[in-house]
Amino acid sequence: MKKALIILPTYNEEGNIKILIEKIFAQQEKTKIWEIYVLVVDSQSKDKTQSVVKKLQGKYKNLFLISTKKMGLGKAYIDGFSYALEKINPYLFFEMDADLSHDPSLIPYFLKKIEKGADFVIGSRYIKGGSIPKNWALYRKIFSIFGNIIARFGFMKPKITDWTSGYRAIKAWIVKKAISYLKNYSGYVFQIAFLDFAIKNNARIEEIPIKFYERKYGISKINSPQFIVQSLLYIFLNSSFIRFFIVGFSGFVIDFSLLYFFINKIHIPSSLIWLAQIISAETAIINNFILNNFWSFAYKKINGAFILSFLKFNFIALGAIIIQTVLLQLMVITFGRNFWIIYKIIIIGLVIIPYSYILYNKIVWKK
């Protein structure tokens, strides 16, 4: 039987932990090919959490407990991963909240997704069948919903609906590979960083719907303002799409500056403006290709077939120019020329940037 380990980070969960552990082990009856283990990673609780777990260890041989310093959710998971890889060696890890917000009866559904080939299964609150508590305060709903929207489109992975979910099943090979990277993230931003790492390492991501329940006992540990700031900072610093956007802007500055220099500073003849445009545009394209390769898409940068990849990049850039030209002409004819700058901005933002990003990923920087 393959080992599936559920890690439960705890701090003062005396009122929840016994019920949760019993419900988790009850799922063993529903699977014949998985052996369920539970590891409680307690951050030196002030209540009787550890005492409750130690008592339950007499009943469940696959129940483990370690005590760590209180240094955030991410640190608790890292400690749990490290201990488990050394002492238990599971095939599959689960992340789950210890406050009964996550329904243990869904464990078999996660396992089925893994059995069908998934590497990383997310319990999503934002697909059909999933939900968040109706009695959540408005600010919590806004933080959760819009936080996930920002992550989905910040990383240009709109099909992944719940980046901050704490209910997940993850194959051990991803955990082993990610530990050194994740040590940099101790708080709840750990969840976004972990998923981002998995995607960049070609893990197959799947989702199942979950209903998220409000805790009945104890208090929530999440610091919403801190989490939002950390998450936005992580997305800004690590999103290949945002880096791609910045690189594109730098290319625009180079293109515009060179053309301005040729026309307004050295006053080239009007008959040669076309040549100046080609030079400025190609210089910008070279800049964009180099910066995208070594920065935006550094995790899959091109080491061989450099010239061929550059030619593909040029071809896609040419396509963007043609699309932009055609759409701008159509909009001018349809709506008049007075607002051509607005048309151009709309075309670039809604068409050219997504078009270029998607094709560069699928053709030039294809893993």
Image (cartoon, rainbow, N blue to C red):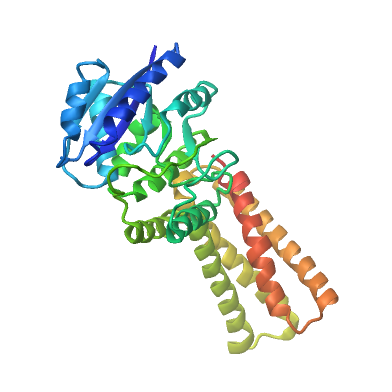
Q: Nearer the viewer, residue 284 or 125?
A: 125
Query: x%, y% of residue 280?
Result: 61, 72
Query: x%, y% of residue 186?
Result: 27, 48
Q: Nearer the viewer, residue 117 or 66?
A: 66
Q: Residue furthest right?
A: 333
**87 lies left or right of 228:** left
Count of residue discs:
0
**169 lies left or right of 267:** left
Residue 196 is at least partly visible in this image: yes
Give the quarter of the image for residue 269.
Answer: bottom right
* Residue 269 against residue 97 in the figure, above or below: below
Q: Residue at x 25, y 31 (%)?
A: 40
* Residue 38 against residue 353 in the figure, above or below: above
Q: Residue at x 54, y 45 (%)?
A: 126
**336 lies left or right of 43:** right
Residue 81 is at least partly visible in this image: no
* Residue 102 against residue 57 in the figure, above or below: below
Q: Nearer the viewer, residue 112 or 250?
A: 112
Q: Residue at x 31, y 31 (%)?
A: 7
